Image (tube, rainbow, N blue to C red):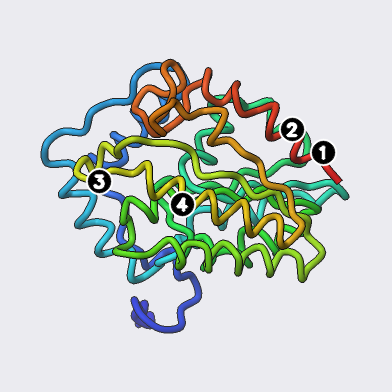
Amino acid sequence: MPEAVQTVGIVDDPCAALPPMPPEIAAFEAALRKAVEEHRPLPTPTPDLPAAAERWMRERQPLDYPNLCKHVAANAALPPPTSDRIVFLGDSITEFWSVMDPTLFDGDRVNRGISGQTTVQMLGRFRADVMALKPRTLHLMGGVNDIAGNTGPTTVARILDNVMSMVELALAHDIRVVLGAATPAARFNWRPDLIAQPHIRRLNDGFRAFAAKAEIVFADYYEALADSDGGMRDGASADGVHPNASGYALIRPIAEKSLAAD
């Protein structure tokens, strides 16, 4: 009789033990990606979808809090790194970038964004999704989802701690770092009661000061995308949070200049 598969502790394949994505969530994610690819407004979830997604994430998150399983197959399939490999680590702003502006990722540029992630989750997968890929350069961008409270209450200081830890790990392994600014947003459609602008400004002030102290490049995407009130400028986003093709076109020159800087 075959041995029973464990669902906790040490197993051969931790990803196989995770609860599968419910079909309605998978369908919404597919619709979301299609809207992004076709430069259309993002779909509105059905009234019961947020609760279903929250239940699924509550089941899954304790079993794979950093979402290490997201990129495990893609990481294994990567060819050996070139001498100028760049890994982009971040959240949905990073994940959707390769959909909206795919030519930015020509050559050995690897996108390891995960929609919805906070910096503590990014730190948890840093070895697997950055260091193990042996990049020459890391493009690091996050913090907006922390402000939204996606993994619980936090402080700007804690977000900075997570980012500083990732930068210090990279530098200790001879990986140069480009630190991207948190992008602007007035409100989050999944947290409409939260006024985001002052927190994003404080976070970027911290990023800028740390980048200067650590002697790394700070890519100021905020200034390129923000309106006078600290929200997304008109025409740069379909939902006020995620850049559209025009928004990514505004920040691409900043990204290219930052990645080329010595």
- Disc with the residue nearer the chain's start (3 vs 2): 3
- Dot 4 lies on which element? helix
Q: Are marks 1 and 2 in contact (CB under 8 Å)?
A: yes
The residue that disc 1 covers is 260
**Earlier residue among tags 1 and 3:** 3
Q: Is residue 194 above or below residue 157?
A: above
Badge 4 local density, few (<14 within 10 Å), some, or many (20+)? few
Disc 1 residue crowd, few under 14, some 14–19, many 20+, Cα 10 Å = few
| Residue at numbered disc 3 | 194
Which of disc 4 and disc 1 is earlier in sequence?
Answer: 4
Q: Give the residue drawn at x 32%, y 50%.
A: 148
Q: Amino acid at mark 1?
A: Ala
- The quadrant of the image that shows the N terminus is bottom left
Q: Reading the chain from its start, which is encountered first: label 2 or label 4?
A: 4
Q: Position of residue 181 (x, y in %)?
A: 56, 44
Mark 3 residue crowding within 10 angstroms, few (<14) / some (14–19) / many (20+): some
* Residue tagged 4: 202
**Front position in the image: 60 or 225:** 225
Badge 2 density bin: few <14, some 14–19, many ≥20, Cα 10 Å: few
The residue sitting at 82% across, 64% down in the picture is 174
Q: Amino acid at mark 3?
A: Leu
Front residue of 53/199: it is 199
Residue picked out by circle 2: 256
Query: In percent of the image, x 38 and y 30: which residue is there?
Result: 229
Whole-angstrom CA distance, mark 1 to mark 3, is 36 Å
**Separation (CA) of disc 1 from disc 2:** 6 Å
Task: Tell whether label 3 touches label 4 (CB within 8 Å).
Answer: no
- Image height of 133 relative to 244, above or below: below
Where residue 209 appears, as percent x and y from the top left, is: 63, 56
CB under 8 Å between discs 3 and 2: no
Q: Residue at x 43, y 45 (%)?
A: 115
Left or right: residue 170 compared with residue 235:
right
